[in-house]
Each structure stands twice: as C-alpha cells, then as structure tokens.
Amino acid sequence: MKLDEIDKCRVPKDEMQEGGLSHEDPTNLRSKKLQDDLQTLGTKLQLHEDNIRFLRTLKDKLVDSIIDLQVTLGKYHASSTPKIETQDGADTQSEDKLSDQKQILQEENSAASILCQLKTNPKMLASDPTLSDDVLGVVAELGKVDDSVLSSLLSEYLGTETMLAIVCKTYNGVKSLEKYDKEGCINKTSGLHGFGTSLGKTLEGRFNVISLETLRPYAGDFVANDPQKRLDIPNPRLPNGDCPAGFIGYAVNMINIDRTYLFFLTPSGYGLRETLFYSLFSCLQIYKTRTEMLQAVPCITDGALSLDGGIIKRSGLFCLGNRDDVKVRFSKTSTNSSLPDHYTESERQMKEMKWKKEKILEDMRREQALLDSTRLNFERKKMEFVQFLAETAARQQTPVAMGRSAGR
C-alpha cells in the first residue's frame, strides 16, 4: 500500500465535525493510529534505503581509488630496481625477520616460540582461522630501533616477558590462544597449548597477551609529514621553562614500526604506535647521560632512560645495580630498507582506504538489518490495517442488511 493511498483513506477532521461528533469514535481513532504508524514506518524505510544507496556509492568510489593505488604501486615494483637487498642479493628484510624469529625461538617452550614456529607452518595455522587472522605477532618483532645501545635499553626496560608478549588485534584473538573446560581448567588440546603439543613442545608457565582494541590510545596529534606517524608530544620542561639538557626524545617515537605493520589499523582506526607502543612506553624520556637524566627529574613523569644505562621506571622509582642482559631485543633498523616517500604515502593511503571500506561495509550490513526489520514491521502493520478496513466495512454493511429485512 503506497503512502499517498494511505493518506486518501484518512477521515478529514472537518467531515467528522460536520457529522455532529463531539469526540472521535474508537474506530476513527484506531484508523488514524494505524495510518500514522504506516506513515512513520514508510519514512523509516525510505531513510534506510537512502542510507544504503549513499554508502554503496562511497564504497564504489573507495574501491576504484584502491584499484588505482594498487596499479601505481604495481608500476613502481615493475619499474624500479629492488632496494631492499644486500650485496649478495639477499633480501635484507627477510634476513631481519629470520633474525627476529631466531632469538624468539631460542626461548624454548614459550608461547612466543610456539607461535613463531607455528607461523612457518601455514597449513597448521590455517586450522584455526581466528588465531591466524587476529594474532599480529610478538612485541619484539613488531618494531625496530636505530642502534644496538637503545635496543638493549628499551628491551631491558620492558623485560623479557613483555618483549615476548603476543599481540592480538581484538579480544577474539586472546580467547583463541587459550581455552578452558567446564571446570575452568586449561584445555591442553586446543589453542596454543594444542599447537605446542603438535609441534613437540609443552607450553610452560604464564605468558602475556595484549589486545589492541582494549588499550587506551594516544589522543594527541602526529608529527606532520612523518611516514612513521610519530606522536607530536611536547618536549619536557623544567620549572624555569627550559627543555632539560641531554634530552634526546621519547621512547615511543624512537621505535621504527616494521614496514609490514606500519599501516596496520585497529577496528577503531588506530595504528601500532598510538596503541601498542604508547601503552608500553607512554612518555618515557631518553637522555644522553645519567647525570643529565637525574637533573631532569622534576619534569619526568613516566620514567626515563639514559644511554649510559640509567633507568627511572616512573616518578620516584629508580633502578640501580648492574644491567640485565636481555636476550630478546628489538632488531636494528636496516639502512637499506628505505623507500621513496611517495611510495610510503601511497601505501598508507591504500591501507586507510581499505580500513574505511571495511567500516562502510559494516555500516551497510547494519543498515540492511534495520531495513529488513522495518520492512517486516511495515508489512505486518499493513496487514493489520487491511484487516481493520475489512472488519469496518463488514460492520457497516450489517445494519443495512438488517434494515432491509425489517422493511420486508
């Protein structure tokens, strides 16, 4: 029933007043109520259909833009000489990856070691889609630093347990790593425990897992035109307003995100730096010397490190004694792995567009569900209105028939 046809069925107020009715009778009231409900549902139907058409147009434009960028990046790969190579022709990035895996695999019977070994067996990993899709990797392999001294310091600050922590995109990944029976005991035949058994390893002790979607991200701005999207955190200031002597920067900005994960975005649209690494380091400050670090204590809030081994965990907590030799460290950034700025920007745009496309598809699914529900309610209300009209017509015909019988 079209909306304009429903309007024709309405009983004009003037006609009801001319009929001498001081109050609308129940039949008219119910008719008006049903017509108003149909009008409201019809408006909602139109709104959801318009929203779906609009979202579909946006999605199509994004798909076209993604294809254009893929062509641009493909042309770059086809026309340029590979720059990520060693003198022997070996892929430096692959060697770095193997180096990361080697130091993790040395931590035998750890969750990180089992996960690392599992990644080399795609067929086994594919048997658990949630784990393979949602688990991003281990903290130690997600970032790199420019020199070995800083790598050693940051790794010692975090500790081996955190360096070997498994990073998941959402809480679904966390749940896939370990499952429990009805009594709350760990099910050794499923999750990472089950994979460990298949690989001939027994997962020992506890292990840390980080869910990116549950972290509170950095809420500020980013450094302008920075391919690594470093955080624009103001420099610390002493009570006199000066920046402390020897201040080098913030640890969160000294991590170079591995290119594989540089443009990764969480379901909420945040990258690894403003979620994972900001959660791990916050505003941890780096100084050249211990002396300069100690002079800056008045403006240290989230801890500090010095290149000669000084550590302040947080305001008022100083770490003294000999340095720990942490075996699992951040790898050193490869000097040969730089890419042209326009390539990096194009890749960033493509990742962002893909993320936007996924969000639009989610919105379309939600709008479609609302449209289906509203359409069902409309059909039910229409049937109710048609039935009401039929009943009303039958009641109006009954007195006429009785009057004719009495006349005879």
Image (cartoon, rainbow, N blue to C red):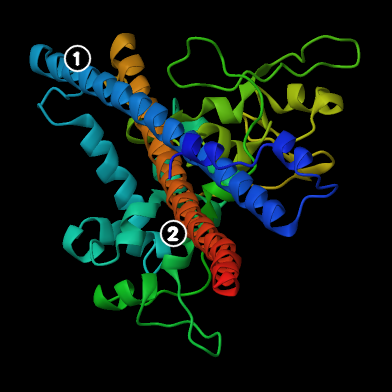
Secondary element at tag 1 = helix
How many residues crowd around disc 2 within 10 Å: few (fewer than 14), some, or many (20 or more)?
many
Q: Which residue is mark 1?
A: 72
Q: Where in the figure is residue 8, as x and y percent of width and height?
A: 53, 37
Q: Amino acid at mark 2?
A: Gly
Q: Amino acid at mark 1?
A: Thr
Q: Nearer the viewer, residue 330 or 269?
A: 269
Determine whether 204 is above or below 8 in the image. below
Q: Where in the figure is residue 242, as x and y percent of width and height?
A: 82, 9
Secondary element at tag 2 = helix
* Residue drawn at x 73%, y 37% as measured from the top left: 13
Residue 154 visible in image: no
Task: Point out the image quarter for the N terminus.
Answer: top left
Residue 43 visible in image: yes
In whole angstroms, how far apart are the C-alphas of marks 2 and 1? 34 Å
Q: Which residue is mark 2?
A: 173
Disc 2, disc 1: CB below 8 Å?
Answer: no
* Residue drawn at x 31%, y 57% as measured from the top left: 132
How many residues crowd around disc 1 within 10 Å: few (fewer than 14), some, or many (20 or more)?
some
Residue 331 found in image quarter: top left
Task: Point out the image quarter for the C terminus.
Answer: bottom right
